[in-house]
Image: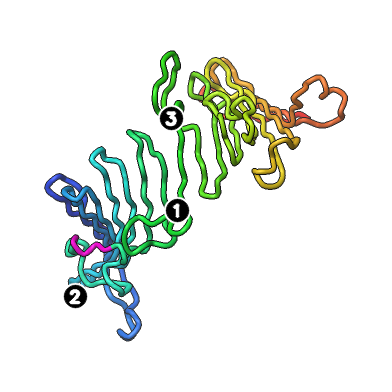
Amino acid sequence: MILRKEKGIYDSQDRLIQTLGPIHDSPLLPGEGQGVRAVRTASWTVHDDAGHQTLSAEGYYDVTLQTFTLFNPITITKYNANGQTTDEIQVKWDSAATHTGSLADFPLGNISQPNYTAWTTYQYSHTHLASTRVYYNIPSSGVGTAGTNYDVTTYGYENDGHNTTGDTWMGRRNMTKSPSGTITRVVFDAQGNVTSTWVGTHDDGATDADPTGSHTSGNNMVCVSSATYDADGNLTQSTAYQYTGEASTWHGSTPTVRVAQMFYDWRDRLVATKSGVLENLSGETSDGVQRPINYYVMDNLGEVTDTYVYS
């Protein structure tokens, strides 16, 4: 039996700051000749509590030379006072692909924006994530501008996260706007189930319950899926509305409708599904279309013992 052992080092707060993997042979690097060396994979984490950031990196430990080598880049996660992630950064220690030494040797004061290789930032409104910026052209200083330096995704919440007298809300995220301008909205029921999903490029007048804003002029949101649940929260019917072309052209067009139904026993176990259901059930007896029904037999442990398919 071969024993392979990992080794961890912890800081004063019992947080893991270094892990060394099992010893194994690794080929020598180009220019070092032929042969292998005994190494251990290494990973490091530095908790800069004063700077509200955590740094992490990967590398290896040369068992013979007893030296560490770190692979660029270093990953930095920054936090605000509430513990929310504000920045995720990848930064080079220097211009080389590797650096001799461990992350514990990294000078925190040398973190410089021109050395960033990747950058994502998060903006908040109270406790809610309001937007995300993903950089593709990192400026040498400052935050840059949308469309020039980064793509921005924005998020919305029920009642925009603020209570209204007489209105019940839970602050759930119900809107996402992509960098391309495509808007996706969802509608929740009182139990928090998503009852419908809507897509478009303009949601003028949209409300939590009606993404079309009672068909406000300019609003082009269309329903792409809907769902029905029973009293126990089980999904009993799923309907997909399939459109063609770009989302901006869907409004006013007729989608292809695909419906599936699900059936449960008294223990809320899924026991049957039916595909290809028509919205108007009376038409199923005359159109000649086969609609598969899957029926599942289970034992007392809830494991499926038999499956029957009817069409």
* Residues rendered magenta in the picture: 108-112
First in sequence: mark 3 vs mark 2: 2
* Number of residues whose C-alpha sits closer than 10 Å to that of mark 2, classed few (under 14), some (14–19) or many (20 or more): few
The residue tagged 3 is 160
Q: Is residue 109 magenta?
A: yes
Main SS category, magenta section: helix
| Residue 218 position (above or below residue 166) | below
Q: Nearer the viewer, mark 3 or mark 2?
A: 3
Q: CA distance from mark 1 to mark 3?
A: 22 Å
Name which residue type carries label 2. Leu
Q: Residue furthest left?
A: 12
Element type at mark 2: loop
The residue tagged 2 is 65
First in sequence: mark 1 vs mark 2: 2
Disc 1 and disc 2 in contact, CB within 8 angstroms: no
Q: Is residue 133 magenta?
A: no
Element type at mark 3: helix
The residue tagged 1 is 146
Name which residue type carries label 3. Asp
Element type at mark 1: loop
Q: Measured from the top left, where is residue 278 in percent x and y?
A: 76, 26
First in sequence: mark 1 vs mark 3: 1
Q: Which mark is residue 254?
A: none
Q: Nearer the viewer, mark 1 or mark 2?
A: 1
Q: Residue at x 47, y 46 (%)?
A: 153
